[in-house]
Amino acid sequence: MSTSVSIKKILVPVDGSKPSEKAAEYAIYIAKTMKADVLAVHVMSMPAYAFTTTPIEGMPTPTAIPIPLTVSGEERKIADGYLDRIEKMAKKAGVAVETKIVENQQSVVHAITESAEKEGCNLIVMGTKGRTGIARFLLGSVASGVLTYAPCPVLVVR
């Protein structure tokens, strides 16, 4: 049986959890086997604004004032650590790897699926559950969303 499956670029979202590291192992193995590249992505999701109720002269108290948010240096350092581990794993296996931090104010799911589409990924390999929120019954909410909206096949790793 001949196959027309062609995998050239694999996106693996990482968040430092055991399931995401396990998914990275699978992604690297598949990339080595298929002679593909790996794109490891860490998504830093944040609301567009926080609000403060600091009193303002002439305004009724309390007044909600939007404050734009940015990623702290410490958060970026932690994300770099996650990506560095994946980069070392891939290089040890002889697999080409690129790492990216994506700051996204919409959703982690949107950031992952948009990255896969923009980068021309043929496969997404991700863990069932990560560090975010309360897990769903069998599948994390991010994994479930990526399965729903991904522009390519998704392999979910336990």
Image (cartoon, rainbow, N blue to C red):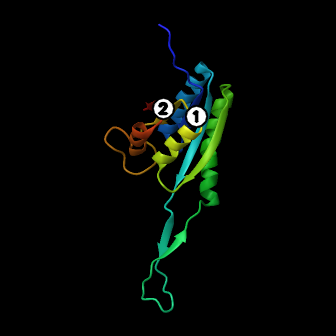
Identify residue type, mark 2: Cys
Residue 107 vertical placement versus 88 (above, below)? below
Identify residue type, mark 1: Gly
Residue drawn 64% across and 52% down? 77
Q: Which mark is residue 120?
A: 1
Q: What SS does tag 1 mark?
A: loop
Answer few, some or many: residues within 10 Å of disc 1's Cα (few below 14, many 20 plus, some between 14 and 19). Answer: some
Q: Is residue 31 visible?
A: yes
3 or 57, which is in the foreground?
3
Quarter of the view holding residue 147: top left
Q: Give coordinates of residue 54: x percent, y percent.
A: 49, 82
Q: Could you give the CA–CA distance between mark 1 and mark 2, rounded to whole angstroms?
A: 9 Å
Q: Which mark is residue 152?
A: 2
Q: Outermost residue, bottom direction?
A: 58
Q: Quadrant of the C terminus?
A: top left
Q: Give coordinates of residue 119: x percent, y percent.
A: 59, 38
Quarter of the view holding residue 157: top left
Q: What SS does tag 2 mark?
A: loop
14 or 11, which is in the foreground?
11
Residue 89 vertical placement versus 43 (above, below)? above
18 or 123, which is in the foreground?
123
Q: Which mark is residue 95?
A: none
Residue 102 as seen in the image, left or right of residue 92: left
Q: Give coordinates of residue 12: x percent, y percent.
A: 54, 36
Q: Is residue 13 visible?
A: no
Residue drawn 68% across and 28% down? 92
Residue drawn 42% across and 89% down? 60
